[in-house]
Structure formats: C-alpha cells, structure tokens
Amino acid sequence: MPSKVILDYGEILSLIKICKFYNLSLSVVCDNLKTRGRVESISEYTFSMILENQIPPNTKSLDISFEFNKEPYHFRGEVVKTSSKEVVLLVPSQIEIWTPRRHDRTFCYGKVFCALNIIRNLSDSELSKMSSLPTSLTPIYRELRKESPTVPLIIKMVKDELTKLGDKSDLLIHKQGENLPLPVVVISRYKKPLLLEDTQNYESYFKKYLGDEIIPFGKFMEDLKWDDDKIKAEVQKFISYFAQHNIRSIVFVPVFLFESIAGHIWVGTLLNKVSKILTPRDVFYIKSMADIISEALVKFKLFSLGSGEEYPLPVYDISLGGMKFEVEQYLAKFLDVETKLKLYIKLNDGKTITTFGKVIRLEEEDGKLFAAVEFYDMGKAEEIILSDWLERNKEVD
C-alpha cells in the first residue's frame, strides 16, 4: 500500500535519473503481460526505456515498479512512442512509495467475488513461439496472439487450412452428453492422434509409429484383449464401412481444453480420387492446428475471465494486504507460488476494484482449492473503496 505519494516534479525526475545511474531493473506490466526494462535516456518531459521483450505497438500505458534503498516505488507511465524494444514515456505526474503492512483479514465468503487474468512473461508468450510455427499457420497465430482472440474466426481459419490437406475434413467442438463415433472415443481414451493410412489394408489398422505419439486404429482392440477372430471380424466391418463412405486414408486428432478433450479434427482422402495417403507428417501438422485451437479455448476460458461482466470466483477472506479465494480445478493448473495476477474484485455493495496480486500460497481445505494472494500496486481510489468496505464489515468474523 502507498505510504507516500511523490508529487514534486523535481523529485520524480531525480528518481528516474537514479534508475538510469544505477542501471536498475524495472518491472514493467503491459495489460496482462510482464517484462523488465532499464532507463536508457532522459529529457525534460520524457524518458526512454529498453525492454527485454517487445510490447504491442498500440500500448497506451505501462505499470512500472522498482526498488531502491529497500523501498518499493510504483508509477503508471503514459506511452509516447514504441519502436521494437524501445519505449518512450512521459515523466509521470506522481510516484508512489509502498511499504509492506500487515492487516487483519475479514471473512467475506458469499459477499465478495473475483475474476482474474494471469500475467504472463512476454518471453513465454506467443511472441516467442511464432518462429517455431509452420509459415502457413502464421495468419492464424496472429489472431491467437490477441489477448482475447475470436475463437469462431480461428476455427474458420483452421477449417480453411484443413481443406488443403485432404478431400474431406472438419473441426468439431463436442457438446455435453454427445454420442461420439468410435475413433473419437479412441483418441479421447489415449489422448493421442489416430492415423489409419490405408482403410482397405488390414495391416494398416495395427501399424506402429516411432515414439508412440500416434496410435493405430486397432490399438484399443488389442488392449481389450480380443481374440484374433473377433479382431479380424471387427476390422472387416471398418474396411467395409470406409469403402462404403469412399474413405481411403483418415486422421483423427484431439483438441484439448486443459487436460480434457474438448473436440477433435479429422481429415480424410477419398478412394475414387487420385489422393495421397496421409502420413505421420500430416498428423503433426494437423496437431499444430489442434494446439492453436486448444490455446484459443484456454485464453477464452482463462485469460479473458476479467472482462468485468462476470465474477465467478468466491473470495473467502480479504484485507487491505491481500485475499484468499476459491479456485476451480482447471484454474489451479495455471497457478503457482509467485504467479502474478490482475484481479477484478466485486463487493456486495456493487462496487468493483481492479488491482494486482501475487500468489503466496495454494492450499486445499475440505476438498476445495484456495489461492492466497498478496496485493501490490493497488491504486489510491481502490484502496479507499476496499478500506471503506472493510470498515463497514469489520464486525463479521
């Protein structure tokens, strides 16, 4: 919490000069992305920083914090210009000095709810993954790089790309309670892609692939320990089925939402055309597209929670210094101690607070998962709102 606000322009400029003189590493938060930077040059009204990672070109402001003589400082810098990893900012009108304090917690279960965004390091985000993608998928990945990508648009772009691989294809998101075809049940069981290179060749149903990253169509029959006669009869049914449906070669690839199968992609070539046999190389290319869909679904589910429209996570207790809130199972997989969060908190009087927090503890109580976070960089207005609410609810134990 701020113990002092520096408003004197000379003092503010002196602090920025100190950052340059001592070559201090400053924490820089851009929306939900975090990087670090150092002051490069200073003029009368602006200063420039060199960041470790490039920020989006349309960035309006940055939340910047640093420590000097064991005192933490924070300010919001208005961006004047960005160029590669260099950013020019206006000298701020104020800098806050923060000192750690301990606060009594107020029980608030059922009264306070929150949503969150995870602040990811830019070096771990999509900006650093672009070079590893096939060039043909770059336009799809550009859409994915957005903080809140348009999932239907990405699905359409992927479907268009799939048409280049086979004569028939589709991308399907599963519905609750939907009856799935057997190949989809198989990839859901093994959580790996399934490849049937030649639907009319018996051996193709049991072909093993290097590294066990791709499963053959008949693996489930072997794992169920069917006898040879039953396996042969079942394979013959599939040979007839695919012949009737004019399918020569087919691939099924799972689409994940966290650890669960949310949908699948399938691509097939036809018997009555001079079509290629699908290969493991095609499978891994299709898997690249499935991974893009998976990440889009994750971002929609997780990184777009803090829209201000819904506050799904109940807060167990809260203070001026931090809070403990209940987390869903899928969210717990993305949280760890030191994970930084952008928090959106809604109080039962209708007021809302937006601030930042750092996970300091993850715990399980009575079968429920909780995360304890320590607030940082809370603005003065938000502090007043929360302080007033705590004062009115301090009788709740």
Image: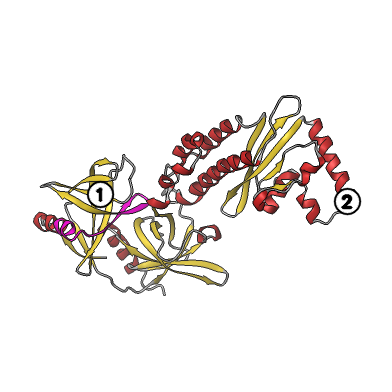
Specify the quadrant that holds the N terminus.
bottom left
Depth check, front residue: 346 or 282: 282
Q: Residue at x 80, y 51 (%)?
A: 221
The x, y position of residue 250, in whole percent, is 71, 37
Q: Position of residue 265 (x, y in %)?
A: 63, 40
Numbered disc total: 2
Residue 284 x/y as whole percent = 60, 43
The residue type indicated by label 1 comes to Ile
Q: Which residues are magenta?
A: 17-36
Q: Quick one: quadrant of the C terminus?
A: bottom left
Q: Residue 228: which disc? A: 2
Q: Observer-nearest residue: 129 or 28? A: 129
Badge 2 density bin: few <14, some 14–19, many ≥20, Cα 10 Å = few
Q: Nearer the viewer, residue 32 or 314?
A: 32
Q: In screen coordinates, is 3 left or right of 124?
A: left
Instruction: Report whether 37 appears left or right of 249.
Output: left
